[in-house]
Amino acid sequence: MHHEFPLRDGLIYLNHAAVGVWPRRTADAVKAFAEENMVQGAADYPVWMKTERELRGRLQRLVNASGSDDVALLKNTSEGLSLIAYGLDWQPGDNIVSTDQEFPSNRIVWESLASRGVRLRRADVSGEDPEGEMIALMDEKTRLLAVSSVQFGTGVRMDLKRLGKACQERGILFCVDAIQSLGAVSFDAQAVHADFVVADGHKWMSGPEGIALFYSTPQARDRLRLSQYGWHMVEAMGDFDRVEWVPTKSARRFEPGSPNMLGITALNASLSLFEEIGMDQVEKQLLERSRLIMDQISEHDQFELITPASSGRYAGIVTFRYKGVDNNGHAALYRRLMDADIICAHRAGGIRLSPHFYSDCSRFEAVWETILSQSI
Ligand SMILES: Cc1ncc(COP(=O)(O)O)c(C=O)c1O
């Protein structure tokens, strides 16, 4: 796999939870697309449209959607979440259940609905039973559960099946921010009864920023009022002389204008690699690497894990801290790791390491040597 990820010498890249690394084939596809645009513009536009269809198919398979009609291509996760928040018909007094660990994109947009009398209830998910805490906050006024499949800071992985079942039983919409799962671990939107799934491609899917999956079931998307219009979202797309129009039934109705063909070209190439390898293999290899990092952390008494180590509770994020060291100390440690070419993140009051399935395990020891050589 190293020929697909020819990282420069000395670099240890453990930051896929922030922005992933493109495989070689993606870099090649983007170079070829640039060259093509330079020498012949869009002369082969039908081929671009084929690539676009291919990507919808790959995303459909990645989340196990029942058809590619359930897949829209948006700009990013935040756009998808905003489309849901401002598409639904809220009543004053409604509430949304979520967690106290969400990335800002999956909190701010729900908080912004306060002006319409909608309350956000945030469950404390730091304990043993995060799903139970969320379910306990649901009542007859709960309209939607908004949760990340894996929390960006702590790395806590949610039991989506249990949450989806609880939502289904109560008639609550289930909205999953899956950006920290897709491309890392297997995902089945139908099995977990998700109504909406959103994820940008730039983390675990190893694609570029600015091209995102927006999944919706037909029933769920029918509940969203449209707020963006254009030639691309109508049933008779491409019939520019037609005066009458209706929005298409498919999720394409959320794509008002020209698609991001450059992003589509790149993400399609990246996902072809994941399909070749198979998500079961990707997940297995990634979990092995996360486990190895956790085991290495537990060998050192001065560290403690922030990410839960029990099987099923973690994916590709391992966050840990030095016992007794404050947040500023971790900020300083983070800067020194980055200076040493160990690409990681400072999150949840500790250091977040996020390998991917291809990461070279033999390099992990160097991370601990660097950390332990620092006075803190
Ligand atoms: C859980 C989660 N949601 C959303 C995002 C980013 O959203 P967007 O695709 O809008 O940039 C991140 C990025 O770190 C994230 O961790």
Image (tube, grey):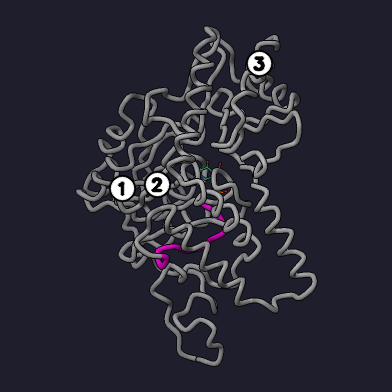
Highlighted range, magenta: 68-77
Identify the secondary structure beneath mark 2: loop
Q: In this view, does 3 lie to the left or right of 132?
A: right
Q: In this view, does 360 lie to the left or right of 335?
A: left
Identify the secondary structure beneath mark 3: helix
Magenta stretch: residue 159 in it? Answer: no
How many neighbours does mark 1 have within 10 angstroms: few (below 14), some (14-19), or many (20 or more)? some
The residue that disc 3 covers is: 371
| Residue located 79% across and 70% down the image | 38
Q: Which of marks 2 and 3 is in front?
A: 2
Q: Do the residues labelled 2 and 1 touch (CB within 8 Å)?
A: yes
Image location (x, y in percent) of residue 348 = 53, 27
**Amino acid type, mark 1:** Val
User: Which mark identifies residue 187?
Assistant: 2
Query: Closest to the observer: 316 or 285?
Result: 285
What whole-number distance in Å separates the C-alpha atoms at marks 2 and 3? 34 Å
The residue that disc 1 covers is: 192
Which of pointers 2 and 1 lies earlier in the amino acid sequence? Answer: 2
Identify the secondary structure beneath mark 1: loop
Q: Which of marks 2 and 1 is in front?
A: 2
What whole-number distance in Å separates the C-alpha atoms at marks 3 and 1? 39 Å
Q: In the displayed structure, would residue 243 be above or below residue 302?
A: below
Magenta stretch: residue 72 in it? Answer: yes
